[in-house]
Amino acid sequence: SLSISTIMSVGKMTFFVMLFTFAACDESDSAKVEKLGDTISYTITKVYTSDQLLPDDTDGFHKYYKASEGNTLFIVEMDITNISDVLYRIWLLGEAKLTIGNTDYEANIAVKLEGQNDSFGNGNVEIAPNETYHVYYMFDIPEQLAGEKAVLTMTSNEQTKTHSIKAE
């Protein structure tokens, strides 16, 4: 399963090697604002695989996400806006599922928080009406599936949209 790790870096003594494989969305899905009913609008901004998801600031104490042994993180970044008039938790506002072949992968959620460059919020972050957050949906998948065709399914209040995506 996906792990959340906390580390301490001292000066330049801690090094990380990050391998990214960028993915492609169908042209119709890339940078297009999508709406699900009257609760959420979102734009997929980036799709890629990586062994880990690091915050912007990795100096000193910070939290990050790491794929489980033999797996990689299939990461879908998007900007999510609450277009309703009700306060929602992000995990409830926009649920995501990745399907590769006949297997479904549930998302772990990380949220970029203003002014907190050394960690992430999780799916329990509340999003007020008309508020937008940058969200990372992470799927812990076997490494050998990173280049396979996948379907991302977004659901909010029983409204569903699918997006065909594939890592390159």
Image: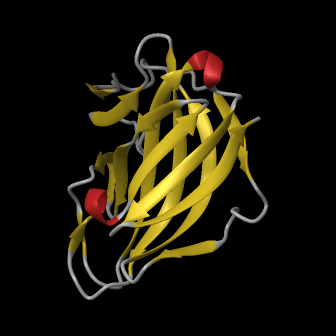
Q: State the image coordinates of residue 89 (x, y, percent, origin top left).
A: 23, 64
Q: Is residue 36 left or right of residue 65?
A: right
Q: Is residue 164 above or below residue 30?
A: above
Q: Position of residue 158 (x, y in %)?
A: 36, 66
> Up-down: is 152 above or below 59?
below
Q: Is residue 22 visible?
A: yes
Look at the image and tell me in which quarter the N terminus lies.
top left
Q: Is residue 84 left or right of residue 16?
A: left
Between 156 and 60, the one nearer to me in the picture: 156
Image quadrant in which you'd find residue 49: top right
Q: Quadrant of residue 55?
A: top left
Residue at 68% in and 46% down: 165
Image quadrant in which you'd find residue 68: top left
Which residue occupies 44% across, 68% down? 80
Q: Is residue 41 left or right of residue 119?
A: right
Residue 37 or residue 8, whichever sits in front: 37
Query: What residue occupies the far bottom of the structure in this picture?
Result: 85
Task: State the residue at coordinates (77%, 35%).
Answer: 168
Residue 95 point in image, percent of width and height: 37, 55
In the rendered image, the vertical position of residue 99 relative to residue 152, given as above or below: above
Q: How is the image coloured?
A: secondary structure
Residue 53 visible, this angle: no
Q: Number of labelled discs?
A: 0
Percent from the top left, x then y, of residue 167?
70, 36
